[in-house]
Image (tube, coloured by chain):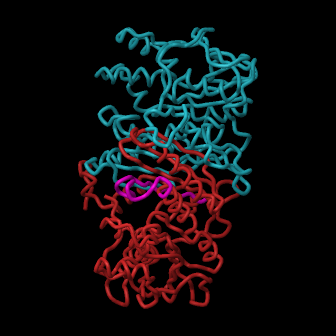
Chain colours: A cyan, B red
Amino acid sequence: MALSDETPLAEVGEFELIEAFIGLYPQGDDVVVGPGDDAAVVRIRNGHVVVSTDVMVEGRHFRRDWASGGDVGRRAAAQNLSDINAMGGVAHSMTVGLTLPTDLPVGWALDFARGFADECAKVGAQVIGGDTTRGDQVVIAVTAIGAVTRAPVLRSGARPGDVVALCGRQGWAAGGLAVLTRGFRSPRVLVEAYRSPEPPYAAGGDAAEAGATSMIDVSDGLVADAGHLAVESGVAIDLRTESFEVAEPLHAVGSALGADPMQFILGGGDDHPLLATFPSASAVPMGWQVIGEVLEGSGVTVDGAAYEGPGGWVHF
Amino acid sequence: MALSDETPLAEVGEFELIEAFIGLYPQGDDVVVGPGDDAAVVRIRNGHVVVSTDVMVEGRHFRRDWASGGDVGRRAAAQNLSDINAMGGVAHSMTVGLTLPTDLPVGWALDFARGFADECAKVGAQVIGGDTTRGDQVVIAVTAIGAVTRAPVLRSGARPGDVVALCGRQGWAAGGLAVLTRGFRSPRVLVEAYRSPEPPYAAGGDAAEAGATSMIDVSDGLVADAGHLAVESGVAIDLRTESFEVAEPLHAVGSALGADPMQFILGGGDDHPLLATFPSASAVPMGWQVIGEVLEGSGVTVDGAAYEGPGGWVHF
């Protein structure tokens, strides 16, 4: 659609708005990767610094009755650390911008900070700054800064003939969210997966080392994020459902809710596994599972057919 | 006060909360400057990278009926660029986290981005990333990343016998805000100063080069920020009102509102001049004005007496 200055954001697509923003931000020669990938990479003096920013809003990305402050803190850190990981980088420093309502119990805020610090400690990153101010709702804006010591792995390098592989749990958080949405608290392992993801922090560097041709962290949904790789690389991707071993708790939730557990795996976000492409199955590192292939063409298919299930995440 | 987990933030002091946060964030050996100064400095491989984060909230830091999207964008960039400047650093890259309400006209958001990019261009910084999501109010979380090629100028280096000097307009934004608060739109030059500050971006490097012993950007208020230098350096600071030439528009507003124009200069924030200390008056660079001296003791005085006027900024 054409953007008029009076168009309310409600009528504007996420990518349209982002494209419009990016068009307004000139990039210099020393920006190795600018807006549009998992993280930006800039050359500062002798080093390559990786930077990623994410914003989480209460009521939209989390609910305080579904997750503790510590859970939200861990998740806020995890999703940014995962973005650095998805570039093949190592996170080093974090900043945290917060708006908090005045009626928030201070314990929630402290619990948040503890959870945040705990998650950062998993990769040796430290919180080096931030800003906190009053607002109508809890908003969390995190910036992660890291280093890459080799060429960063972008979204745009997948080539026909590559294999598609995944590392980390996928669909568990979506299963947990489905449970919580219906007022239940079990299976507990899925609820915990939703509250506190466990991204495979070592996997990004391994994949880069192994020659991954493209990589992304799955936060919007597996099909949606595979779609980002396909678009940026100018290829098609086919995922094979037979390659997934559906974990028992996902079967249980599927039965209880009358849902196909594959919908959590294909459509779910928030687990932050890594999705990458490699030149061949023999190049795929330990801990990764081959789940599909890269083809000529465009778009994402599942078992060779269009995917009609629940999809990704639309911001506006 | 003692913090209980159930204490609402409304009853907790800003610094108490920040201290509590900082206590939860361990700092490694390679963090040159951690939380608590204008910006954090980290050693990444061969370089020193400077990082600063600020959050602005609609209704608290700006009003959409008092400032255009472009004005707010310029201000959001300026206050972060100014923090890098206040370390003696040069800003290189920016990230922008946004929450925006769905009824916001897209023109406002685009105007914001334009203003933001324009301000960044003044110092050659570029926007390398960000995140935008829906929220109840406009929240802007900016992270600025820069480099320092010499030792950063901290808040803690002022010594008795140093002179205190200021570079840039001071009090104009507060005068403009006072005008807007009373429903007026003139003097226009003050309203513009409030809407779109003009920090002295070259002055930070000059001051560092000239041997500034401490430095801060004035955002909370002149007396309040002098107080930050005094506390961090363990010294007293006396400011001399006779050293300020009160600009004509400030006189005009003072007369119109029945206020002493010095209250805008001493209490006002938002202009983002730099405040620094130097070993002697002869060391003060061109463009800076000596406005006081550093003494043994603690606290900030004005003409030797306690300052009782409007003060700084309390976040909660």
Q: Quadrant of residue A233?
A: top right
- Residue A153 in picture, x, y percent from top left: 69, 35
Q: How many marks?
A: 0
- Residue B151 in picture, x, y percent from top left: 63, 70
Residue B302, above or below B50 = below
The N terminus of chain A, quarter of image: top right
Residue A142 seen in render = no
- Residue A273 in picture, x, y percent from top left: 55, 28
Q: Is residue A265 magenta?
A: no
Q: Is residue B70 magenta?
A: yes
Residue A4, above or below B201 = above
Instruction: Kindly identify the residue that appears in the image at 51 percent across and 13 percent down.
Output: A308
Residue A143 seen in render = yes
Q: Is residue A91 left or right of residue B56?
A: right
The C terminus of chain A, quarter of image: top left
Q: Which of the two residues, B191 or A76, is positioned nearer the viewer here?
A: B191
Residue B198, above or below A117 = below
Instruction: Kindly identify the residue that appears in the image at 44 percent across and 70 percent down.
Output: B188
Q: Is residue B315 left or right of residue A302?
A: left
Q: Which of the two residues, B301 or A280, is positioned nearer the viewer here?
A: B301
Residue B264, above or below A44 = below
* The residue stretch that appears in magenta: B50-71
- Residue B88 in picture, x, y percent from top left: 60, 69
Q: Quadrant of residue B45?
A: bottom right
Q: Is residue A264 left or right of residue A21?
A: left
